[in-house]
Image (cartoon, helix red, strand yellow):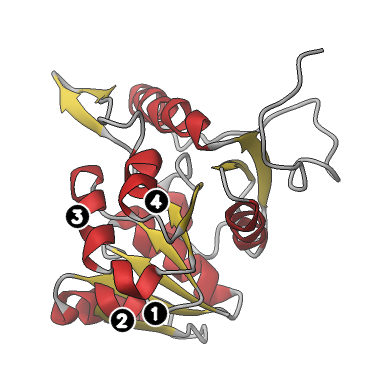
Amino acid sequence: MHVGIIGGTGPAGLGLAARLADVGIDVTVGSREATRAKGVVEEVLDRWPDRSLALVGDVNAEAARADIVVLATPWDAAVAAARGVGDQLTGKVLVSMCNPMHKVSGEFQWLTPARGSVAESVQVVLRQTAVGAAFHHLPARTLAKLDEPMDCDVLVCADDPLALEQTVELVRLIPGLRPVVAGTLSMAGAIEAFTAVLLNVNVRHKARASIRLTGLNVGDVGTAQVGRPRAE
């Protein structure tokens, strides 16, 4: 498998790239400038010289040629970045991990994109791409520390069954992450918004807390069918 990460030079995208490469996945870290992408990849490789990380850096268009692609740009650049490589994404699954927020008086606050979420906004402009949403709540610093185990649930949502399936499988590749199907893309706004809450908790308590849900059947959480739940 080859995974591309558009805008993967930020802390979260680069941490995810390193985790995937650490389990043997070929990963292309994308950026608007190839030199920027190659530079940050070299820093990761220098940090972990004893690990065989199949990481390369290139422009976003090259990252978009991968089998499955993750969108990790700043939230306000996500739609433009996705549209810019739309031809390469046709017929593929794109996973958005973008969180719309800003900081006001030291507090992270969620912003509401025009379509309700970054993931939905991207789906509107990429009609020939199946968009999923995941990885929003993972602490970037923990992701980047490959010698620290992960122990988190990852909420996954998508409208398209293929997007749901491939996003769930992508989450499962990383040891310690459990995919939990949360519903259609209409849930993405709530998931993105909660990231601001979690960041504020971590700042206030000087922690790196993540999400772990209780009361779930471990065998079912990553296989639930896409679609709206029936009323009981």
* Mark toward the start of the polypeptide (4 vs 2): 2
Separation of marks 1 and 2 at Cα, in angstroms: 5 Å
Residue receiving disc 3? 80
Separation of marks 4 and 2 at Cα, in angstroms: 26 Å
Separation of marks 3 and 1 at Cα, in angstroms: 17 Å
In the image, 166 versus 99, the foreground residue is: 166
Single out the mark in the foreground, 4 or 2: 2
Separation of marks 1 and 4 at Cα, in angstroms: 27 Å
Tags 1 and 2 touching, CB below 8 Å: yes
Q: Residue furthest front?
A: 127
Looking at the rendered structure, the kind of residue marked 4 is Arg
Separation of marks 2 and 3 at Cα, in angstroms: 16 Å
* Mark toward the start of the polypeptide (1 vs 4): 1
* Mark toward the start of the polypeptide (2 vs 3): 2
Residue receiving disc 4? 141
Quadrant of the snapshot with the N terminus: bottom right
Specify the quadrant of the image occupied by residue 230.
Answer: top right
Crowding near the residue tagged with mark 1, few <14, some 14–19, many ≥20 C-alpha atoms within 10 Å = some
